[in-house]
Image (tube, rainbow, N blue to C red):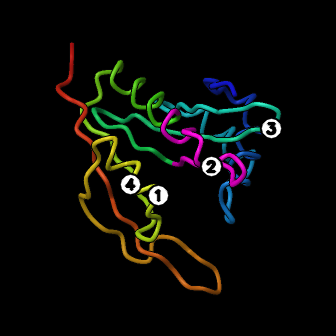
Amino acid sequence: MKLIACTPADAPAMAEAHAGAFAASWREDEFEDLLDGAGIYGFLVSGDEPAGVILCRIAADEVEVLTVGVTEAARRQGIAQALMAAALGVARQAGVAQAFLEVAEDNDPAIGLYERLGFHRAGKRLHYYDRGPAGTAHAHVMRLDLGPITA
């Protein structure tokens, strides 16, 4: 497995990894458009097939993890942790003070990972995730202090 810093040319592989991780996945053109935006960066873990993806946005002194997902076949191999470490490393190098993300309140494995990385619950978004006929799921907003801004 290889960790790749993404460009818009990686949008097809990012969309493929995202589709393997989520029932409601993002399209290739969405990744491409986002990667063209200011402050946006992402990583892809790939071997024979794309296995995991993360996309983040830095604005002012904050970074938001827009999405992070690992394909079902590649879970429990440390891929999400590697993606988060790479993304948070970029944010720290940019002098970002805080990281934020949303996670479904019933996603215990992801919540556990984020808490091990130092994130804590900072709020809740009601009915944030559309679960189709099953209804909606609430999201926890999680926050990580990355330290003071460096000049």
| Amino acid, disc 2 | Arg
In-image side of 112 versus 11 (left or right):
left
The quarter of the displayed image where residue 127 is located: bottom left
- Residue linked to disc 3: 49
Was residue 44 drawn as part of the magenta stretch in this picture?
no
Image quarter where the N terminus lies is top right
| Amino acid, disc 1 | Pro
Number of the label disc, if any, that sits on residue 112: 4
Q: Nearer the viewer, mark 3 or mark 1?
A: 1
Number of the label disc, if any, that sits on residue 109: 1
- Label 1 – label 4 distance at C-alpha: 5 Å
- Label 3 – label 1 distance at C-alpha: 23 Å
Q: Are marks 2 and 1 in contact (CB under 8 Å)?
A: yes
- Secondary structure under badge 4? helix
Q: Nearer the viewer, mark 4 or mark 3?
A: 4
Was residue 71 drawn as part of the magenta stretch in this picture?
yes
| Amino acid, disc 3 | Glu
Q: Is residue 43 above or below residue 94?
A: below
The region drawn magenta spans: 67-82
Q: Are marks 4 and 3 in contact (CB under 8 Å)?
A: no
- Residue linked to disc 2: 75
| Amino acid, disc 4 | Gly
- Secondary structure under badge 2? loop
